[in-house]
Image: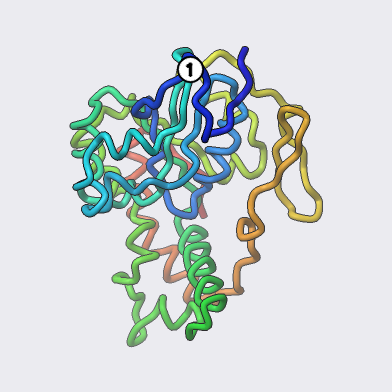
Amino acid sequence: MPLKMCPHLHPQGTSKRAPHSIIIGVRKGGTRALLEMLDIHPEVAAAATEVHFFDWDENYAKGFEWYRELMPYSYPHQITVEKTPGYFTSALAPERICAMNSSIKLLLILRDPAERVISDYTQVYFNRLENHKPVQAIENLLVRNGALNIRYKAIQRSLYDIHMRNWLRHFPLEQIHIVDGDALIRDPLPELQKVERFLNLPPRIVSTNFYFNQTKGFYCIRSDGRERCLHESKGRPHPAVNSTVLQQLRSYLQEHNRTFFRLVKRTFDWQ
């Protein structure tokens, strides 16, 4: 089995190919963890960066060859995987991906949608702090004039049923594998084994590929004799949210969650 290659080299027998599978989202759902854990597999070639080809018009206009050039070199027995979390909530991405390859296998990683909202806020909060921009308390964004601010982008991204409907217009449910992001954090291996089966990959990912990092409080990766954890921006502590506001958010999301469960024919233990 050939070793993983440096992306800048072009080893004999390799080529750049359109992805066989795309991690379509969701933002703050664990897409980076999923891609890096999947990249342990010797038959997976993972794209190094988020490409934003199907959700950003200016990139889509550059054409398919431009997109393919951003993929890693891979051997014929490997599958190429790209991840861009923005695809899931994009109105245009499903149709565009379908036009490229209507039989492509899609990976969607989701977590508790209320927790995802808070995580979304946390990322923006720290980004703004680092760029010396003003920040707001999460309650000021979640509530406007005493009512839940459902136009807040972070809430819109957590309406999984609305976005899923758009994908199901273009792809059958069998082509979209949903990874439980909360389960992936708690115990990565079972979720990765389901992904291996979905992608028709031989089982190569094993329990020794993961170890729990007590300092960070989540699992890290061990492969090829090396250990690595996700970037320090991952797993940041969430702010405490006013319990009344949090309850408002959870109540609003409840009906959307139930609709989503019906659409995907499975349930998740979201609060």
Where is residue 12 drawn, in percent x and y?
50, 16
**Left or right of 65: which side holds 138?**
right
Q: Can residue 247 be seen in this view?
A: yes
Q: In this view, does 247 lie above or below 65?
A: below
Q: Which amino acid does label 1 sit on?
A: Tyr
Look at the numbered disc 1 and give the secondary structure of its residue.
loop
**Left or right of 110: which side holds 223?**
right
Identify the residue at image location x=70%, y=46%.
229
**Left or right of 134: which side holds 52?**
left
* Quadrant, the N terminus: top right
Q: Is residue 136 visible?
A: no
Count neighbours of disc 1 (C-alpha within 10 A) and say few if under 14, some if 14 to 19, many if 20 or more.
many
Where is residue 97 drawn, in percent x and y?
25, 35
Outermost right residue: 214
The residue tagged 1 is: 75
State which quadrant residue 178 falls in.
top left
